[in-house]
């Protein structure tokens, strides 16, 4: 028990490399409450209420992200503002988390950029899809960086380290973390949204500043299968005109083996997003209008 407690304390101190104390990290974990959950087969996903970040992903009883600690993060950076780290010890912007038609919807706003994140499970696969829509209501064109960072630990409590690699799969650059003892594997990437995907350098476990995000995007790391305690990141550089919106997405596949995760990811790339209920309603109205016009013409 003492050894396990010591490992967890060390883990927290390593995560918050920007000077956040272990006590502050534990306090953050304590107040983070799950607002929404999704389950499909043996895969369960929990999203934090306070910031809309992932709290846990559990496959067949195995947690990939060590529930309770700040192991997943997302944020935005651009001219005139810095990264708003959702789990890096800084307070996030006011965030709303809701469920809608089996999906989890996160909404917030950063310096005139309205953000809508949609989490969904790809039907029949152990794949979590994250789609983010950014709407620029700032009144001026902006160039922003959007990131998602994770620190996979699927062999806990025995080992924080994973076998880490970056390669091309199904037309996408993916970052993969495989548990040394269990073989449980997670990998992430996108074949539809251009992104910088890879691991953080050194012993990095998260993105905590604009400079850290820029450094990652300039030089993402490929450990080439090395065993280490590292975080992986998916980041986009986006130019958004005044009043415009842009959408980006990536898939996060999980498996009881490397082959399982790779197969799930590959299959997911051929499955398009299911439209959200509002979009379906608009589509239905459009089809009805088209049918009526055809009848009038006839």
Image (tube, rainbow, N blue to C red):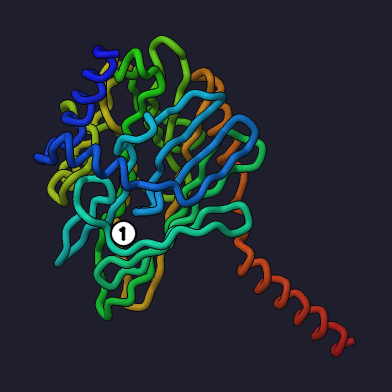
Q: Residue furthest bottom?
A: 296
Residue 238 at x, y percent in the picture: 31, 59
Mark 1 Cα shell of 10 Å, populated few (<14), some (14-19), many (≥20): some
Q: Nearer the viewer, residue 265 or 122?
A: 122
**Which quadrant of the figure contains the C terminus?**
bottom right
Q: Is residue 133 visible?
A: no
Please give the name of the residue rendered at 55% of the width and 48% of the height, measured from the top-left corner.
Answer: 120
Q: How many marks?
A: 1
Along the horizontal axis of the image, is 187 left or right of 138?
right
Along the horizontal axis of the image, is 104 left or right of 14?
right
Q: Residue furthest top?
A: 181
**Which quadrant of the figure contains the N terminus?**
top left
Along the horizontal axis of the image, is 12 left or right of 108?
left
Would you place residue 35 above or below residue 4 in this image?
Answer: below
Would you place residue 101 above or below residue 148 in this image?
Answer: below
Q: Is residue 199 visible?
A: yes
Residue 153 at x, y percent in the picture: 36, 24
Q: Residue furthest right?
A: 298
Please give the name of the residue rendered at 46% of the width and 48% of the height, measured from the top-left corner.
Answer: 130
Q: Quadrant of residue 126?
A: top right
Along the horizontal axis of the image, is 201 left or right of 280?
left
Please give the name of the residue rendered at 62% of the width and 38% of the height, measured from the top-left corner.
Answer: 40
Would you place residue 118 above or below residue 163 in this image?
Answer: below
Residue 235 at x, y percent in the picture: 31, 47
Q: Nearer the viewer, residue 139 or 32?
A: 32
Q: Quadrant of residue 132?
A: bottom left
Please give the name of the residue rendered at 62% of the width and 45% of the height, measured from the top-left corner.
Answer: 271
Element type at marker 1?
A: strand
Residue, disc 1: 238
Would you place residue 218 above or below residue 292 in this image?
Answer: above
């Amino acid at each position: 028990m003492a050894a396990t407690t010591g490992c967890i304390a060390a883990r927290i101190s390593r995560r918050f490399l920007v000077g956040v104390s272990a006590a502050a990290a534990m306090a953050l974990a304590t107040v983070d409450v799950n607002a929404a959950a999704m389950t499909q087969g043996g895969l369960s996903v929990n999203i934090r209420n306070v910031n809309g970040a992932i709290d846990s992903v559990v496959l067949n009883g195995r947690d990939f992200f060590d529930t309770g600690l700040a192991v997943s993060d997302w944020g935005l950076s651009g001219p005139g503002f810095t990264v708003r780290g959702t789990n890096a010890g800084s307070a996030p912007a006011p965030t709303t988390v809701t469920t809608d038609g089996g999906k989890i919807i996160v909404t917030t706003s950063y310096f005139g950029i309205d953000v809508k994140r949609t989490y969904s499970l790809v039907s029949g696969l152990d794949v979590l899809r994250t789609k983010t829509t950014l709407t620029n209501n700032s009144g001026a064109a902006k160039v922003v960086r959007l990131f998602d960072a994770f620190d996979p630990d699927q062999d806990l409590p025995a080992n924080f380290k994973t076998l880490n690699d970056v390669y091309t799969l199904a037309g996408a650059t993916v970052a993969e973390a495989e548990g040394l003892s269990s073989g449980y594997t997670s990998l992430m990437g996108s074949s539809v949204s251009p992104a910088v995907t890879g691991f953080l350098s050194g012993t990095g476990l998260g993105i905590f500043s604009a400079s850290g995000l820029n450094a990652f995007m300039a030089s993402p790391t490929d450990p080439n299968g090395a065993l280490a305690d590292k975080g992986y990141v998916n980041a986009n550089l986006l130019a958004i005109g005044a009043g415009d919106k842009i959408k980006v997405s990536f898939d996060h596949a999980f498996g009881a083996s490397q082959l399982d995760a790779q197969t799930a990811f590959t299959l997911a790339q051929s499955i398009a997003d299911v439209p959200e209920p509002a979009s379906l309603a608009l589509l239905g109205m459009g089809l009805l209008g088209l049918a009526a016009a055809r009848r009038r013409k006839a």
